[in-house]
Image (spheres, helix red, strand yellow):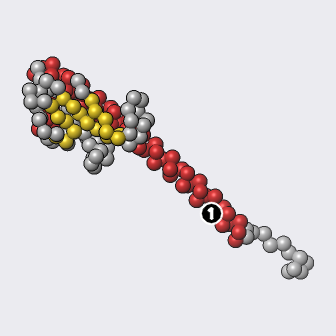
Amino acid sequence: MTLLNKKISGFTLVELLVVIAVIALMMSVILAVWSGLKAKSRDTKRAADVKAIQDALALYNTTVQRFPISADVLVLTGADAVSLELISSGSIPAVPTDPLRNPPYQYSYQTDADGSTFIVTYYLETDSISGKSAGENTVTP
């Protein structure tokens, strides 16, 4: 048998480039889906956090007969005056913060002058939460 009759097997350069292109396309689709899932997950956490804050404020109001007073808009950091007041009253063990913690993704709080009502403002990244839209959302008592 001569060297010319021997069949050489392997991949051509074109075949390798096609496989690499297909893998790159699949990875870009997976990354896009993954990014969307992460945003939806953060929004779900935000909805749960805001519900916990709202419940803590209701418990505080039941005990003190008013909401913690903050006439100016206050960002809830867990160490701010309102958070510390809710924690010290036993209304909540710790005040949650937004998963991203960068403006506009943060929880803010404001009351009227006598503490009879409040507004908690938060931002969502997607429309995945039923009844809520992406962007600014608020809750009140």
Nearest the camera: 97 or 128?
128
Q: Which element carries disc 1, helix, strand or loop?
A: helix
| Residue 23 place in picture, x, y as percent | 61, 58
Q: Quadrant of residue 6?
A: bottom right
Nearest the camera: 89 or 117?
117
Q: Quadrant of residue 90?
A: top left
- Work out which quarter of the rendered image holds the N terminus and state it: bottom right
What is the crowding at mark 1: few (fewer than 14 residues within 10 Å), some, or many (at least 20)? few
Q: Is residue 93 visible?
A: yes
Q: Quadrant of residue 28?
A: bottom right
Instruction: Report the residue marked by disc 1.
Output: 20
Which residue shows up at 71% across the image and 69% down it? 14
| Residue 138 place in picture, x, y as percent | 28, 33
| Residue 24 place in picture, x, y as percent | 58, 59
Which residue shows up at 84% across the image and 72% down it? 7
Q: How many marks?
A: 1
| Residue 31 place in picture, x, y as percent | 50, 52
Which residue shows up at 28% across the image and 49% down it? 102
Which residue shows up at 38% across the image and 42% down it? 125
71 sits to left or right of 56: left
- Work out which quarter of the rendered image holds the C terminus and state it: top left
Name the residue type under label 1.
Answer: Ile
Q: Is residue 88 visible?
A: no
105 sits to left or right of 115: right
